Amino acid sequence: MRYFYLGFILTVAAVVGLLGFRGSLSRKPPLEIFPDMVRQPKLRPQSPSDFYQDGMSSRAFPLGTIARTKPYTIAGQVVKVNGKSVYPYENNPLTTARVPGTTNFIELSPVPVTAKLVDRGQDRFNIYCLPCHGPVGNGQGVTSKFGVGGIADLHSRRIVEMTDGQIFWTITDGSPAKLMGPYGPMIPVEDRWAIVSYVRALQRSQLATMNDVPQSEQAALKK
């Protein structure tokens, strides 16, 4: 047992001799076994560097990087909500699809509906939505021929009565039952609103009544 105590005392003496007591002052540089990133190798902006072939320390932005100072644009037009441009870092109905300060979805899209927006929505719909929902949105896409079930009919009463914000958020986060996965990481905010506008156009094309047709054109349809 005495050898154990002797070894313990020698170990403590060696540790104290090398590292000192906690909180004690010393003019010698400390021994850092785990520096915990106290000092990190870095380069000042615009300074030269031998690490890269072009000799520059500052690198170009990765592809797909969204500038925080650039507002959202749709169909070449800057999107404005309540007269103000919207930026990617803001919590805004354009990006959240919710009424500010609540968990309620907004009733109508904050993006003005134009022919360009609907055309863009059709293009994106045909890429991301058509395989499951079908070209007219009735849930009879090509995946249904391979036994995939539970695909929503976009003309059903449940979806027709959804707010624009809820449709946007379903595209973003997926369906509540997760039968449809989230498309937020793949479809930009602007294109999600474009798809919402096209879905509404599809619904009108299938569910519109004669009362929805301008009176000046009703006579031609009745022939």
Image (cartoon, rainbow, N blue to C red):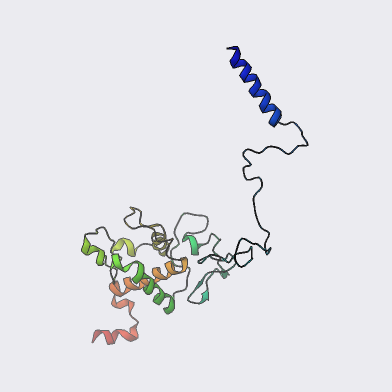
Tell me where residue 223 appears, x and y as whole percent.
Answer: 23, 87
Tell me where residue 202 appears, x and y as whole percent.
Answer: 32, 72
Front-lying residue, 34 or 173: 34
Tell me where residue 73 appears, x and y as whole percent.
Answer: 51, 72
Residue under the point 44% across and 59% down: 105
Task: Answer with left or right where residue 56 lies relative to residue 123.
Answer: right
Note whether residue 187 is visible: yes
Front-lying residue, 88 or 26: 26
Task: Answer with left or right where residue 44 lies relative to residue 62.
Answer: right
Task: Answer with left or right where residue 141 lies relative to residue 190.
Answer: left
Residue under the point 22% across and 62% down: 146
Residue under the point 41% across and 75% down: 120
Note whether residue 140 is visible: no
Residue under the point 63% across and 64% down: 58
Query: Which image quarter: residue 125?
Result: bottom left
Task: Answer with left or right where residue 204 lies relative to residue 111.
Answer: left
Quadrant of the drawing holding the N terminus: top right
